Image (cartoon, helix red, strand yellow):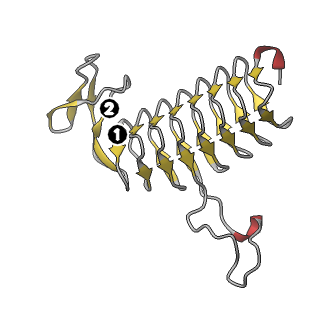
């Protein structure tokens, strides 16, 4: 990696095996593990933990205290709020049934994908094996247990859809049927149920 265009705070721990894109900033006490790929012009806040082999696109903002465990892919343009947690094990245990300490081969990593332009609210918990669609908005403190459609607004525990949001993050207004418009920027949408 070309470290001349990367800012890494002296207290941050960044593996030599991580790939960091130009213009990316990694702030105090953050940890970036082995084989992590972070794109260009990202901002990784204070006390962020990025586990091994996590993939992060370009222009991503990860706020203070976020925890991102392996099995997670974050596409470009995503916002991750402070204290958000991406988990990777639906059946966590420290030990096997016989009392022996679990090792890497004793469980299956759950995969999580956050698609382009989505936003994850402060303190949200994202369970494994979910995909969060393009420009979706996850409310603060939500617990996401299943896939989230593109442009969906979800909140609560477990997270449930409460309408749709525009690419500008404004809640859309229904025009009848599956037609919506944004009161802030005027963009129009039609959502087809799968």
Q: Which residue is mark 1?
A: 152
Give the left or right position of residue 131, taking residue 9 as reference: left
**Label 2: how many Cα within 10 Å (few below 14, some 14–19, many 20+):** many
> Is label 1 in a helix, a strand or a loop?
strand
Q: Position of residue 113 (x, y in %)?
A: 55, 44
Q: Which residue is mark 2?
A: 165
Q: Position of residue 176 (x, y in %)?
A: 13, 35
**Label 1: how many Cα within 10 Å (few below 14, some 14–19, many 20+):** many
- Asked if residue 102 is positioned above or below residue 86 in the image, the reply reads below
> Is label 2 in a helix, a strand or a loop?
loop
Quadrant for the N terminus in the image: top right
Give the residue at x 63% y 29%: 45
Give the left or right position of residue 188, taking residue 94 as reference: left
- Pick the front one: 176 or 114: 114
Q: Position of residue 70 (x, y in %)?
A: 67, 49
Give the residue at x 82% y 20%: 3
Q: Are marks 2 and 1 in contact (CB under 8 Å)?
A: yes
**Of the image marks 2 and 1, the number of the one nearer the N terminus:** 1
Q: Residue 80: which numbered mark, if any?
A: none
- Asked if residue 186 is positioned above or below residue 14 in the image, the reply reads above
- Asked if residue 144 is positioned above or below residue 190 in the image, the reply reads below
Label 2 vs label 1: CA separation? 6 Å
The furthest residue to the left: 176
Give the left or right position of residue 134, taking residue 184 as reference: right
Residue 23, quarter of the rendered image: top right
Give the residue at x 50% y 32%: 116
- Numbered label tally: 2
Residue 103, quarter of the rendered image: bottom right
Q: Position of residue 105 (x, y in %)?
A: 75, 68
The furthest residue to the bottom: 98
Residue 166, quarter of the rendered image: top left
Give the residue at x 27% y 29%: 189
């Amino acid at each position: 990696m070309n470290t001349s265009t990367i800012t890494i705070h002296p207290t941050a721990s960044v593996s030599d095996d991580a790939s960091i894109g130009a213009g990316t900033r990694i702030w105090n006490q953050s940890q970036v593990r082995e084989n992590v790929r972070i794109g260009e012009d990202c901002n990784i806040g204070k006390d962020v933990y990025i586990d091994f082999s996590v993939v992060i696109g370009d222009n991503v903002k990860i706020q203070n205290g976020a925890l991102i465990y392996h099995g997670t892919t974050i596409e470009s343009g995503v916002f991750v709020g402070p204290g958000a947690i991406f988990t990777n094990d639906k059946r966590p245990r420290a030990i096997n049934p016989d009392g022996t300490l679990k090792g890497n081969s004793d469980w299956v990593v759950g995969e999580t994908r956050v698609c382009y332009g989505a936003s994850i609210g402060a303190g949200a918990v994202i369970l494994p094996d979910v995909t969060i669609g393009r420009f979706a908005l996850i409310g603060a403190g939500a617990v996401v247990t299943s896939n989230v459609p593109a442009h969906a607004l979800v909140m609560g525990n477990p997270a449930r859809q409460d309408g749709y949001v525009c690419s500008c993050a404004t809640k859309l207004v229904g025009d009848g049927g599956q037609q919506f418009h944004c009161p802030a920027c005027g963009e129009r949408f039609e959502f087809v149920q799968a």
